[in-house]
Amino acid sequence: MKTVLVSLLLAAVSAAADSKPLVIAHRGASGYLPEHTLEAKAYAHALGAHYIEQDLVLTKDNVPVVLHDIHLDTTTDVARRFPGRARVDGRFYAIDFTLAEVKQLIVSERFNAKTGAPVYPERYPSGASPAEFRVSTLEEELQLIAGLNRATGRTAGIYPELKQPKWHRAQGRDLAKAVLPILARHGYATKADACFLQCFELAEVRRLRTELGWQGRLIMLIGGGAKGEDGTDFAAICTPAGLQDLAKIADGIGPAIGRVVTWPAAGAAPKFTDLVAHAQTAKLAVHPYTVRRDDLPRNCPSIDALHAALLRDARVDGVFTDFTDVTLAWLKR
Ligand code: CA
């Protein structure tokens, strides 16, 4: 009896994480709280996100922390707290700071490091906040999500991204080798686990699958330009042959929205590419990024129109969204 109950529960749990299309909380509920803080992750879970994203970089002492950039200066007070610790380019790199130092930083809404102006002025206020948001480690965030999954009885999956592995290697570090054991320890290792591992670098995606033996699901991110930072040829990947080839190692793609749909002019109908059809023919899932109501694609009239184009017309398999609740509400309607 107990076994039956447990399997029923497990079935319900995996159904929740794998309901289609997937709503992926981009950097957490980043439309409402500073990105990648535990607060933003807890709120994303509460809003009902199917998956919650973690961008990962290494500290000086090789600890994977949850940060979108290899730099600390656009989301924390590092420049004030550690003046003189910038590199010659004026940037403060997470890899130059120990975890103990990173933990001293206060996280705020993303801002322009030169002007101090918030990137999204309508979001959580950046100055004078009494809340002391902090950078968290991957380990801490996985513990939080596991705790919430248990306490709520609803499983939210995880969606970790290896940020700039080639750059990390140039610094003498191996990001993937630091991250994979932590994922395995938390039960994320196979395609049955509620986890998608993602990366913008094709060489790293290939290495994860072959050399490093990652058996879980794997998503190739595809930027809007022709090439990635490491030289990955995005245009070649997006051809039917490129996608067939990718399908040998990856389970899906995470393309910039503009690779799926654009609005040629104000008031014009959306124009769709063949990318989703070609990807789905190759049996690749498609999870475009990023739905933002305060930063819509050029000429897109509303977030409703964006949701309709991606989820109803292009029939993608999931979306990255800064506004989990708005995306879920659209799906419900
Ligand atoms: Ca990301």
Image (tube, rainbow, N blue to C red):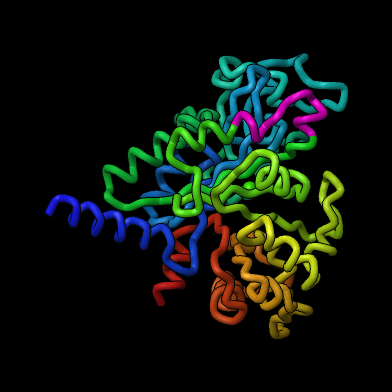
Residue furthest to the left in view is 1
Q: Is residue 25 magenta?
A: no
Q: Is residue 123 visible?
A: no
Q: Residue at x 50, y 53 (%)?
A: 191
In the rendered image, which quarter is residue 83 located in? top right
Image position of 218 (left or right of 187): right
Identify which residue, 126 or 38, lies in the foreground. Answer: 38
Tally the numbered discs.
0
Identify which residue, 216 or 231, lies in the foreground. Answer: 216
Q: Residue at x 67, y 19 (%)?
A: 60
Rendered position, 219 above or below 113: below
Rendered position, 299 above or below 83: below
Rendered position, 198 above or below 178: below
Image position of 26 (left or right of 242): left
- Residue 192: x and y in percent read 45, 54
Q: Is residue 81 visible?
A: yes
Residue numbers of the magenta segment: 167-178
Image position of 109 (left or right of 270): left
Identify which residue, 277 or 249, lies in the foreground. Answer: 249
Q: Main secondary structure of the magenta part?
A: helix
Q: Residue at x 18, y 55 (%)?
A: 5
- Residue 218: x and y in percent read 61, 52
- Residue 332: x and y in percent read 39, 73
In the rendered image, which quarter is residue 241 located in? bottom right
- Residue 164: x and y in percent read 74, 39
Q: Quadrant of the N terminus?
A: bottom left
Q: Is residue 177 magenta?
A: yes
In the rendered image, which quarter is residue 266 located in? bottom right
Q: Quadrant of the C terminus?
A: bottom left
